Image (tube, grey):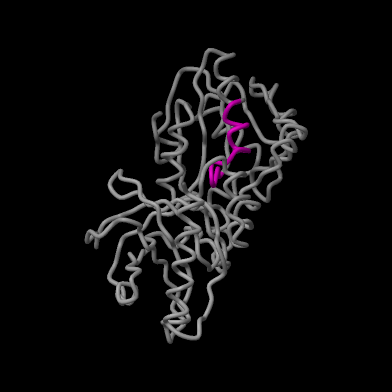
Amino acid sequence: MKVYNSIEEFSTSNKTAVTTGTFDGVHTGHKVIIDQLKRAAEKIGGESVILTFFPHPRMVLYPDDSDLRLLNTINERIKMLEKSGIDHLIVHPFSKEFSRLSSTEFVRDILVNQLNVATLVIGYDHHFGRNREGSFKHLQELAPLYDFKVEEISAQEIQQVNISSTKVRTSLLNGEILAANQFLGYNYFIKGTVVDGEKTGRTIGFPTANIKINEWYKLIPTNGVYAVKVNIEGNIFNGMLNIGNRPTLNENDTSTIEVNIFNFDKEIYGQEIEIEFFERIRDEQKFDNITALKEQLKIDKEQIIQLLN
């Protein structure tokens, strides 16, 4: 797969099958679209192209709305789409200027003149162009003018999958990890750098690695205790992760992400690690004392070992 940092970088004399969207999460619903895209490219003897955007359009159009969090960083999204078997991925910088393109301008100047589209694949109820004025009906009117075909993923196909990035985000923010993972078709994950913490965990027999997420927009699941697997330089370990304020140990409201990695005792400060979520075990709790906390952590660890094994 070739990756381009803007539409202007892309050029081909071959026919293309194109789809466009944010593809946040690259979930099972997206895979339906990607599979149809690849079939469309094969049918025309051409190349498959995904046009996606970064930053997310909502971040540009509604900059004061800081609530949006994404399932993937842009690098994660690229790596996941790389596995999908498409020929070209264009990550175009989304801007207010770009958002002002009319639907006709988008079709004529971008899809036809720049991407050489022969088949456009779109999801059911897809809208595009300034104020989302473009629709499937509008595309059907433009297609004969500019000599391309439009293939729409049917409502029935989408309903069978019944997934959206919003549904996945909602599941994660509600702590419904099993549902989120089912929607995604893989286990949700975060990547972060191991940073210095207060080292309180090691004094009670549960040393933790404190994780700093480098991209502010990456979605962090809701507070609680999770069964996770931890990837450290390609080696996989079971672990117990806590997201929250550590109310038994902490006097302030600072939220942390810390993971107790089972059967692991090396110093990994400054390293990037990947954490894969399997299940949420319980809410974060405030215990009466450290002894009660330790006893609960022992119970949590045993439950997680059984679950992950």
Q: Is residue 222 above or below residue 122?
A: below
Q: Quadrant of the N terminus?
A: top left
Hey, which quadrant is residue 269 in on the image? bottom left
The image shows a total of numbered marks equal to: 0
Q: Is residue 162 left or right of residue 12?
A: right
Which residue extends farthest left?
Answer: 267
**Residue 251 among those drawn in magenta:** no
Where, by quadrant of the figure, is residue 141 drawn? top right
**Residue 35 drawn at (x, y percent):** 58, 26
Of 163 and 151, which appears nearest the observer?
Answer: 163
Residue drawn 53% across the image and 67% down it = 224
Residue at image point 46% right, 47% down: 93
- Of residue 138 and residue 301, the one placed in the foreground of this image is 301
- Of 5 and 214, which appears nearest the observer? 214
Q: Nearer the viewer, residue 197 or 192?
A: 197
| Percent coordinates x, y for residue 15 in the rendering | 52, 18
Q: Is residue 73 above or below residue 265?
A: above
Q: Position of residue 142 (x, y in %)?
A: 70, 29
Vertical position of residue 3 compared to residue 200: above or below: above
Which residue appears at 73% of the width and 40% of the height? 125
Which stretch is magenta? 22-35
Q: Is 265 left or right of 227, judged from the image as shown?
A: left
Q: Residue at x 64, y 44 (%)?
A: 129
Query: Is residue 33 found left or right of 245 in the rendered image?
Result: right
Image quadrant of residue 297? bottom left
Please tell me whether residue 34 belongs to the stretch shown in magenta.
yes
Image spot of residue 176 (x, y percent): 62, 57
In the image, residue 193 above or below residue 236: below
